[in-house]
Image (tube, coloured by chain):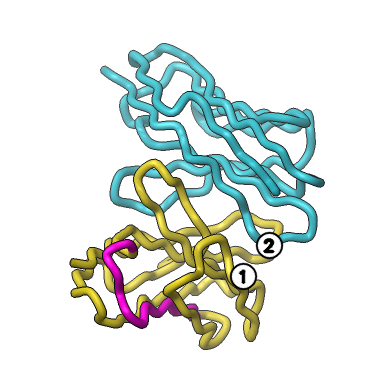
């Protein structure tokens, strides 16, 4: 059974204070790891897909990296508008079913 | 650019009532999903449809039924609503089973 654990559950940062969110996973044959951003009262919004260890993707202040056991979402010089819940999901083997972590709630104070 | 559209956005039901949540996507995606999201539980898959004409149970299917009406539409039905089904429901779609999912804005359902 696929497992995804995100840490920390909640993170408070000052504007400009860089940090990383962690997504640890246990799967049999990773087919893809996905990062989403979810704002209050809205559906998750796709950010990145990573397929193999060593892969990195960047978008503005966000950078996602992948190893064989975990993924990090690095946030460089965050702004208050980066405040959201960040979700990680994995797909493995022959399954169409993604497994989601419970998310990290990020608050960036001005 | 509608993406994934869910209706209604909010609904209050009495215990025992039935209702259908509607979902439509305009991205020509093959796979569609229904999730529920509860505080502290994250997103849990109720049902999914890998392609038109097929549906399969997810993690929490009890009390729900689905219909993949055509490639665009995937509906979720609650036959006899229970307070435990109070939740936020999200529909999502993806091009294939390997690609990222796009989510609707959600339906906030309260069963009293």
Tag on residue B47? none
Comparing B85 with A82, the one in front is B85
Q: Which quadrant of the view contains residue B21?
A: bottom left
Q: Residue at x 44, y 50 (%)?
A: A44
- Horizontally, is A13 left or right of A37 in the view? left
Q: Is residue B44 above or below residue A69?
A: below
Estimate the spatial distance between the alpha carbons at disc 1 and disc 2, rounded to whole Å: 8 Å
Q: Residue at x 19, y 74 (%)?
A: B14
Tag on residue A96? 2
Q: Which chain is cyan?
A: A
Tag on residue B31? 1
Which region of the structure is painted magenta? B73-84
Under circle 2, the secondary element is: loop
Q: Is residue B76 above or below residue A14?
A: below
Residue B68 x/y as whole percent: 54, 83
Magenta stretch contains residue B80? yes
- Chain of residue at mark 1: B
Q: Which chain is yellow?
A: B
Residue B83 x/y as whole percent: 27, 64
Q: Is residue B87 above or below residue B68?
A: above
Comparing B95 with B76, the one in front is B76
Contact (Cβ within 8 Å) of mark 1 with mark 2: yes
Magenta stretch contains residue B6? no
Instruction: Characterize the local packing of mark 1: few (<14), some (14-19) or many (20 or more) Cα atoms within 10 angstroms.
Output: many
Question: Which quadrant holds the C terminus of chain A?
Answer: top left
Q: Is residue B41 above or below residue B103?
A: above
- Chain of residue at mark 2: A
Q: Residue at x 49, y 16 (%)?
A: A19
- Horizontally, is A63 left or right of A104 in the view? right
Q: Residue at x 37, y 35 (%)?
A: A84
Instruction: Characterize the local packing of mark 2: few (<14), some (14-19) or many (20 or more) Cα atoms within 10 angstroms.
Output: many
Residue A93 x/y as whole percent: 79, 54
């Amino acid at each position: 059974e696929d497992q995804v654990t995100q840490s920390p559950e909640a993170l408070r940062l000052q504007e400009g204070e860089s940090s990383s969110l962690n997504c640890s996973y246990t799967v049999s044959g990773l087919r893809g790891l996905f990062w989403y951003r979810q704002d209050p009262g809205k559906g998750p919004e796709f950010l990145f897909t990573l397929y193999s260890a060593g892969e990195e993707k960047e978008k503005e202040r966000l950078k996602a990296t992948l190893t064989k056991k975990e993924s990090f979402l690095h946030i460089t010089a965050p702004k208050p508008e980066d405040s959201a819940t960040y979700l990680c999901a994995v797909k493995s083997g022959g399954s169409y079913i993604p497994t989601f972590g419970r998310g990290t709630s990020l608050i960036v104070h001005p | 650019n509608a993406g994934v559209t869910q209706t209604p956005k909010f609904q209050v039901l009495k215990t025992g009532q039935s209702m259908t949540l509607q979902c439509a996507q305009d991205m020509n995606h093959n796979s569609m999903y229904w999730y529920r999201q509860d505080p502290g539980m994250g997103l849990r898959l109720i049902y999914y449809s890998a392609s038109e004409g097929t549906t399969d149970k997810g993690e929490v299917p009890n009390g729900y039924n689905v219909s993949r009406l055509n490639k665009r539409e995937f509906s979720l039905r609650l036959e006899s609503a229970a307070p435990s089904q109070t939740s936020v429901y999200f529909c999502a779609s993806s091009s294939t089973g390997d690609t990222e999912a796009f989510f609707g804005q959600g339906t906030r359902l309260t069963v009293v």
